[in-house]
Amino acid sequence: MDIVKGIRFISLICFLHSLSTTGGHVHYDYVGDFVHYLLKSVMSSPKINPLYPQSERIVEKSTHDFIVVGAGPTGSVIANRLTEIPNWSVLLLESGEEAHIISDVPFLCGAMEFTDYNWGYKSEPQQGFCRGCTGGRMELPSGNVLGGSSIINYMIYVRGNRVDYDRWAAKGNPGWSFDEVFPYFLKFEDAHISRSDEEYHHKGGFLTVSDVPYRTKAAKAYVKAAQEAGHAYTDYNGAQQLGVSYVQGTLRDGGRCSSEKAFLRPIRNRRNVKIQTGSRVEKILIDPQTKRAYGVKYSRRGRIHYAFARKEVIVTAGPLNSPQLLMLSGIGPQEHLQDLDIPVIQNLPVGITMYDHATYPGIVFRLNDSISFNDLATSLSNPSFYLEYMGGKGPITSLGGVEVMTYIRTNVSMDPEPSYPDMELFMIGGSINTDFGVIYRKIFNIPSEIYDKIWRPLEGQYVYSVLPMLVHPKSKGYIKLKSKNPYDAPKFFANYLSDPDNIDVKTFIAAIREVQKINANPAMQKYGSTLVDTPLPGCENEMFNTDRYWECCLRTLIGSLYHQVATCKMGPKSDPEAVVDPRLKVYGIKGLRVAGISVIPHPVTAHTVGPAYMIGEKAADIIKEDWKHEIRIMN
Ligand SMILES: Cc1cc2nc3c(=O)[nH]c(=O)nc-3n(C[C@H](O)[C@H](O)[C@H](O)COP(=O)(O)OP(=O)(O)OC[C@H]3O[C@@H](n4cnc5c(N)ncnc54)[C@H](O)[C@@H]3O)c2cc1C
Ligand SMILES: *[C@@H]1O[C@H](CO)[C@@H](O)[C@H](O)[C@H]1NC(C)=O
Ligand SMILES: *[C@@H]1O[C@H](CO)[C@@H](O)[C@H](O)[C@H]1NC(C)=O
Ligand SMILES: *[C@@H]1O[C@H](CO)[C@@H](O)[C@H](O)[C@H]1NC(C)=O
């Protein structure tokens, strides 16, 4: 760390320390703006010793075997695996820059959203949800940095359920059943988990997955209470997903293990890979006659460049930008492109489907003892916590407070598969008040009227919360371009809670009942744990804790967990929503594939970074297989 960064970092810590004493007095909007400003400037300062100096050496109109667009988890794996073949050259273009080392600190993960590492998208205001959110909009953060969203995510590692993959294959996508994708999950994993079903984990892969070294007493009590309520103590990435488990994280020695750290850093000096940051692809070059993709047009530091691909262009630009880039390049719904004056090369249903995982942040329990995170500022300003963190331990290794996962099947579920969860409940050893409304409040776009009523009175108190995540939403949204200008953010219509039978709302409510049931057990009651019953502003007219009350809450405050899938959906030719085939090839275009969570056909019972790595591994193998005639000649 150089001196300037060091000083900034220390001032940030001092500032956070002062928060712990003044938090109750200084208005959080000012405090928040200042913290965000400090973080932003620290994180965007230029690198004195960049890990990827090659980025600055641009070769005009260079030609490569493969061009990979976007260095998130999927793109990082693909660049790594393809350059195992010494004769293949890969250009990996990433719009964002190298991350600052502060992004390694797990406890700060929520704050990454307020740096330049986030594309900064928001959803369009819609009637059925987020009625109480600031501007009626949800934040839709997405990583714009080398490592993609794995630099700004919460590091929760979940593989997903066998049923997710078996149904993916059964929809006409050979090769994607659980038994076929499971070896890829094992391949990248280096697991260090105490409660683990051994045959479901692997040691020695690139990506470290481990327990969080620090657990609050509240988390331990909660795991016990969940067992008292009848949930088995399991390894959710093991034989059975239903049950309660401590969270498993993409953590290495107590710090973030991003896709940059896991897959790019070890290969950055390979002669056949060029990893180039700050390079934003504006368009895929496609010959309109032959319909073959032959390169990309990108901008770097305000200048336009071109690069060419002998074999393929692979789009791994994330779930929100991959569909945008395809549409800007003339691949998308014909009418929509024509309306925007974009010449149509291939009419495909890009962006017409977008499923996402929603969560409700307002289920908070008050505790009568010091067993959870008291406040973020105290945690961050205690010097002994830093010493512990240097040794890979202590509260700062917490995944932003996320500690325990419970997978349940509510009685609303009509799924024929008895072991298939319909809800995830994740327990946090704190709540929105833990950082005095500076970070988490903004993540959920909670306006002061709501914060001041519900959370401000809880500041400095011991609380915990449980956030239900709807794993298989019936409601689906879509993405449209705003214009043909690549620098205009697309429009995201999330359409949450809009399914005609209201199953999504009913499932949420059933989960909220289960959360209360778990809390009522002796292990939690030992700490006098009680549901905070201040009525949510906007829902005062409903009787507290009735189904109608909770439906009102869900429609007033809801947030995305950033797992948008199916925006470039995989499917057989007969699927009217399909953009890519089961080998990730874009229908109708040669030399072009899309990979990443954007291809997943339906919501999975997971947080999506695990599946993103798996798709990268599988994509690399598919590509090697498709070019095996050439690999054979080379050997
Ligand atoms: C705030 C947040 C928290 C999350 N928490 C978790 C979690 O705890 N656990 C979990 O499993 N998942 C989590 N996720 C989701 C998970 O991180 C993503 O699903 C995963 O990173 C997707 O991988 P990807 O490779 O498909 O795309 P991304 O990670 O989005 O990477 C795409 C990359 O492409 C680059 N790019 C985009 N457009 C262009 C362009 N035109 N030119 C050049 N480069 C471009 C982007 O800058 C980015 O680096 C979270 C996501 C967010 C945003
Ligand atoms: C589900 O359980 C709740 C009680 O926990 C009950 O009120 C409700 O009627 C049940 N719903 C169904 C569909 O069985
Ligand atoms: C918390 O509440 C429980 C249950 O009422 C009680 O047994 C316990 O002594 C209380 N603890 C403290 C520290 O007040
Ligand atoms: C592979 O690379 C080697 C050395 O760079 C070269 O001699 C050989 O011809 C290449 N083979 C093919 C098939 O491109």
Image: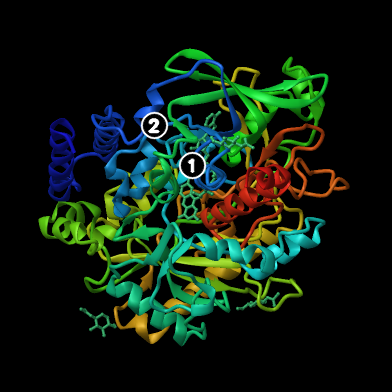
Q: Give the crowd class for mark 1: few <14, some 14-19, many >=20 residues within 10 Å.
A: many
In the picture, residue 466 is in which quadrant? bottom left
Q: Which residue is mark 1?
A: 133
Give the residue drawn at x 38%, y 48%: 261
The amino acid on which the numbered mark 1 sits, given as a three-letter code, is Cys
- The mark nearer the N terminus, 1 or 2, is 2
Q: Position of residue 159 (x, y in %)?
A: 55, 64
In the picture, residue 585 is in which quadrant? top right
Q: Position of residue 221 (x, y in %)?
A: 34, 79
The amino acid on which the numbered mark 2 sits, given as a three-letter code, is Glu
* Of the pair 589 and 609, the residue shown nearer to us: 589
Return the residue found at the far top: 303
Q: Which residue is mark 2?
A: 97
* Of the pair 516 and 486, the residue shown nearer to us: 486
Look at the image and tell me whether residue 118 can be seen.
yes
**Quadrant location, ligand no. 2:** bottom right
* Of the pair 217 and 578, the residue shown nearer to us: 578
SS at circle 2 = loop
Label 2 within 8 A of ligand 1 by Cβ: no
Taking the image as shown, residue 189 lies to the left or right of residue 36, namely right
When the figure is inspected, residue 205 is found, relative to residue 581, above or below; the finding is: below
Return the residue found at the far right: 574
